[in-house]
């Protein structure tokens, strides 16, 4: 892949734009209704007998269950341009599903448990070979449009 | 058939950073100390159960028991190596217990020895870049370190119960205070409130001194029958209960390294540890109210408040007040919480940590916990959590 305009997901198959909206790709158990993220090869519910799992576009809005601000740079497996302390949150997406991710579009001192959030896809870093590398994040609902 | 099992002896290599030695040497030191306390020698040991580490030793195959046997006693022992990450020591203990209770062996040792890499614990070498692997995703998509998981629990507790930054700091201070008299602990200096709150913020609301670092250390416990227990003439310490468990479907806890949870109502957080502790209590025929000493896995100050509540020692939200009143102190009115000084004063030597917890309880019950003895301790309990939903708990009595 060449060209500065190319943008690639940090991990293939983890999220997608569905009708212009960012959605996480997970798994839904058709037998018991449990949602999983990322994709799961089987249903973990011990009471579920059939475990008929299928790909699912997960809910893309929710509320903040909890959060933290990381003040130390994570090990090199994590790449991020212009590193600075940033927020991570756990977001309750409904359907019993809670997903962790970076928070964006909100000052670190204005993050509040219970705030409404939506899924966005944003650049994480620029890679010389792959181009712009994207990850999923959560932004305030009704906030600025993601890049 | 099931017969009573006793702790014959316990031993440990002091915790710290020991780059000049090897995990094998530390394992041998711990074993020799435990054998000394038991008044036994290597020829008496019929089986060796080791917690397998991924960091050092074991010939790359996790064969830590075999390494010890080949170094110290080539004598036809049963060597068993168990995985379980930070709970591996408790799983090794439960395995050794079963080997004796079943009648198959009379003397079996459980041990864990660890030399840890510096800094944040990295992914295992050679791991695949698998888009369904949580440990891969938590790094590349968001860079979530282990403290970030604990910090989100701590932040939520502030929201749910009004826990203050000062209370978290005082939980860490209790651990440092307890460690002052413990020669095995790495951090033995009494630490003040300003020092804890003034230490660098790692992941809000947790400061550096409220999070356990990593250390090198080793611990061993020799288990055996009553006949062997009577040899040393020391007070008889019986294994009243021990159990391991995985988690329950729907657990709402933040589980390292998972980037999501499929949550169901009515399921306890940290359910693997809760279930293991409940099973151990059922086996011993006791409840939390009977326990004099509790050694729990305090990876952070949050654990010191949350775990006694999860394990049924008090109601949700009550731990803050109990801590403030001194009820968790050595000699306090509730259970003595981590009289050893806990992970916060030792630093975690992953696979060795759960064995050290058991050593500590044994010393407390024998009355030999010099410098940090809980008065009249008769029932002690351990609780530990390991990666990938491994819970372990052990109850000893005199």
Image: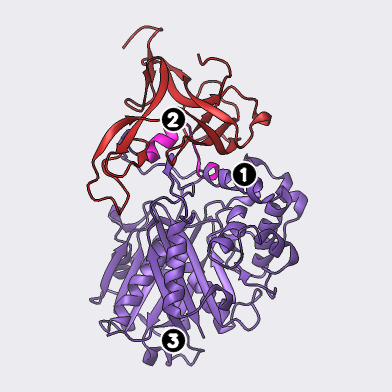
Chain colours: A red, B purple
- Camera-side residue: B141 or B153? B153
Question: Which mark is on residue A76?
Answer: none
Which residue is tagged 1? Answer: B155
Of callouts 3 and 1, the N-terminal one: 3
* Nearer to us: label 3 or label 2: 2
Q: Quadrant of residue B32?
A: bottom left
- Residue density around tag 2, few if under 14, some if 14–19, many if 20 or more, within 10 Å: many
Q: In 3D space, how far apart are the residues under numbered discs 1 and 2 (Cα atoms)?
A: 22 Å
Question: Which mark is on residue B141?
Answer: 2
Q: In 3D space, how far apart are the residues under numbered discs 3 and 1 (Cα atoms)?
A: 49 Å
Q: Quadrant of residue A47?
A: bottom left
Question: On screen, B166 above or below B13?
Answer: above
Q: Quadrant of residue B316?
A: bottom right
Q: Residue at x 52, y 55 (%)?
A: B215
SS at mark 3? loop
- Residue density around tag 1, few if under 14, some if 14–19, many if 20 or more, within 10 Å: many
Whether the magenta-drawn stretch holds residue B136 is answered as yes
- Camera-side residue: A11 or B123? A11
Q: Are the residues under badges 3 and 2 in a single subunit?
A: yes
Which residue is tagged 3? Answer: B39
Q: Looking at the picture, how far across and down is residue B155, in whole percent?
A: 62, 44
> Left of B198 or right of it: where is B127?
left
């Amino acid at each position: 892949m060449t060209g500065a305009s190319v943008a690639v997901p940090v991990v293939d198959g983890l999220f997608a734009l569905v009708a212009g909206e960012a959605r996480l790709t997970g798994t839904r158990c058709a037998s018991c209704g449990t949602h999983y993220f990322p994709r799961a090869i089987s249903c973990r519910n011990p009471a579920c007998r059939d475990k008929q799992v299928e790909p699912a576009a997960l809910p893309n809005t929710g509320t903040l269950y909890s959060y933290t601000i990381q003040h130390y740079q994570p090990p090199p497996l994590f790449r991020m341009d212009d590193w600075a302390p940033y927020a991570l949150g756990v977001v309750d997406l409904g359907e019993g599903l809670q997903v962790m991710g970076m928070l964006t579009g909100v000052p670190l001192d204005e993050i509040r448990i219970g705030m409404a959030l939506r899924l966005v896809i944003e650049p994480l870093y620029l890679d010389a070979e792959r181009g712009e590398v994207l990850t999923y994040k959560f932004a305030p609902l009704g906030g600025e449009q993601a890049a | 058939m099931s017969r009573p099992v006793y702790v014959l002896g316990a031993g440990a290599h002091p915790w710290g950073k020991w780059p000049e030695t090897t995990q094998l040497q530390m394992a041998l030191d711990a074993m020799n100390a435990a054998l000394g306390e038991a008044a036994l020698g290597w020829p008496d040991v019929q089986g060796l159960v080791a917690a397998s580490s991924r960091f050092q030793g074991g010939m790359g195959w996790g064969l830590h028991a075999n390494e010890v046997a080949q170094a110290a006693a080539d004598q036809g022992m049963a060597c068993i190596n168990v995985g379980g990450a930070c709970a591996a020591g408790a799983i090794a203990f439960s395995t050794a217990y079963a080997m004796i209770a079943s009648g198959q062996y009379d003397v079996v040792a459980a041990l864990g020895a660890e030399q840890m890499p510096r800094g944040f614990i990295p992914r295992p070498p050679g791991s695949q870049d698998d888009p369904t692997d949580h440990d891969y995703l938590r790094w590349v998509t968001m860079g979530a370190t282990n403290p970030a998981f604990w910090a989100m629990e701590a932040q939520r507790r502030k929201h749910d119960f009004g826990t203050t930054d000062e209370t978290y700091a005082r939980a860490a201070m209790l651990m440092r205070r307890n460690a002052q008299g413990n020669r095995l602990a790495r951090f033995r200096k009494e630490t003040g409130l300003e020092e804890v709150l003034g230490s660098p913020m790692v992941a809000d609301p947790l400061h550096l001194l409220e999070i356990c670092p990593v250390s090198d250390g080793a611990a061993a416990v020799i288990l055996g029958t009553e006949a062997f227990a009577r040899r040393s003439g020391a007070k008889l310490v019986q294994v009243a209960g021990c159990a391991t468990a995985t988690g329950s479907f729907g657990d709402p806890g933040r589980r390292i390294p998972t980037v999501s949870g499929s949550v169901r109502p009515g399921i306890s957080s940290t359910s693997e540890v809760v279930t293991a502790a409940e099973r151990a209590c059922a086996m011993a025929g006791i409840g939390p109210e009977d326990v004099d000493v509790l050694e729990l896995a305090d990876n952070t100050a949050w654990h010191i408040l949350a775990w006694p509540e999860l394990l049924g020692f008090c109601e949700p939200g009550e731990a803050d007040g109990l801590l403030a009143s001194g009820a968790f102190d050595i000699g306090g009115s509730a259970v003595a919480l981590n009289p050893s000084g806990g992970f916060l004063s030792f630093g975690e030597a992953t696979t060795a940590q759960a064995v050290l917890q058991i050593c500590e309880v044994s010393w407390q019950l024998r009355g030999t916990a010099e410098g940090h003895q809980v008065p009249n301790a008769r029932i002690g309990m351990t609780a530990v959590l390991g990666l990938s939903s491994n819970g372990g708990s052990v109850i000893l009595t005199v």
